[in-house]
Each structure stands twice: as C-alpha cells, then as structure tokens.
Image (cartoon, rainbow, N blue to C red):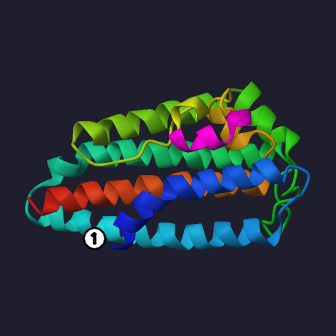
Amino acid sequence: MLHTTMKRLIPYILILIVANSCFNRERQLTKPDLLTLHYLEAMLDHEESRSEVLKEKLIEVNSATEFSEISKLTDTLITVISITKEEMINRCGGRDESFNLNEPYSSDCVGNFFINMKYGEELQMHLSNFEDFLIEKNIDIKRIALDANQIEEFEKFPYYLHHDFSEYNFGNTTLTQALVRLAIFELNITSLQTEYLSKVSSM
C-alpha cells in the first residue's frame, strides 16, 4: 500500500535530501527542488483524501471519538507547518503577483528563521508530540523530530552529528529546499494519521 511504503521511505528521503545538501552547498538546485515539491504535494493530496474516507467510515459506525485525538494533533501540526511556511516565505522575499517566490534560492534568511528565531524548535516540539501519541497507540514509526546525533544514518556524516534538528534540516538551505522539507513532514504526518485511522477502523 502507498501509505505504508511512504511511511517507511520518508525518513530516508529526508536524509538523502540533507546528505545531498552536504555535498552541494555551493550549488543551488533549481528544477529538481521544484519538481520534488510538486511530487510531494501530489502524494500529500492522495493521503489527505484517503484519510478523509477513513474518517467518514468511522463516523458511520459511531466511532468518532476514536479519531478525535489524532485529528486534533494532525490539524494542529499541519496548521503550524502552514503558518511556518507562509511566515518564512514572507521573511525571505515574499511572492510576486503570480504567486511565484521572489527569492526561491535565498538561504541566509531560512537559517536565521529556523535557527536564530527558534521556529525550528517549535516545529520539532509539535512533531515530537505527534510521534509520542502514535508510539503510545502502538503505531510503528521512525521518528524524524530528532537531533542529528540521535539518527543512526547520520553516523556516516560526522560533520552533522553536532547539529540539532533545526541546523541539519534548515542550515545552508534555500527557500525552495526548506519548502521541500516541510512538504515531507506534512506527507509523513498525513500518512501516519491514515495508518492510525486504518488500524482503528479495522478493529
């Protein structure tokens, strides 16, 4: 199933993107970033649709209380990410009249936004709360709201081991790359919510 496969692949996709940035700090990715963002948004739409179908199924059997908690957590987290994206875009050049990014490859403002202004810490906190809930409900997940030294795969990239969540996700990162990372987080959240709802609906 797509949602199960994506759940397991997303942490590795994230690590590959970050690792790619390690070796390409001076090279600004253009079309690959935008295409990745487009594909992630398409998959996110699929997962959101599937999640809504499962919610309706639970309501039909009077099991609304079974998903009220996960829905509240998911909605809060998606809202936080949406607000974070728009605030970041506004601080990093904004959009033109056609809604395109004015400065898609600016990077200094992205690091300042997530690291110095602490938006990354807030995002990590909300992601951790979401992951804690799923672990309590016995949903098999691979945490992504971690500092680099907590991620086994980063042992291959010792330079990054002293970086916290904000630094390794958003340091030396262009605006477009930051949007890709946030889209990955959104897809992961929606996919995990779908898995939880699927588990509950099958009981």
Query: Residue under circle 1?
Result: 53
- Left/right placement of residue 93 relative to residue 118 reads right
How many C-alpha atoms fall within 10 Å of the one at disc 1: few (<14), some, or many (≥20)? Answer: some
Q: Where residue 178 sits in the image (x, y, percent)?
A: 71, 50
- Left/right placement of residue 151 relative to residue 142 reads right
Q: Residue at x 47, y 39 (%)?
A: 127
Work out whether 58 lies above or below 151: below
- Residue at the farthest front position: 156
Q: Magenta: predominant secondary structure element?
A: helix
Provide the residue span drawn in magenta.
152-160
Q: Is residue 98 magenta?
A: no
Tell me the quadrant of the picture where the N terminus can be found.
Answer: bottom left
* Residue 113 quadrant: top right
Q: Residue at x 51, y 46 (%)?
A: 79
Q: Quick one: 87 or 6, which is closer to the camera? A: 6
Amino acid type, residue under disc 1 in the picture:
Val
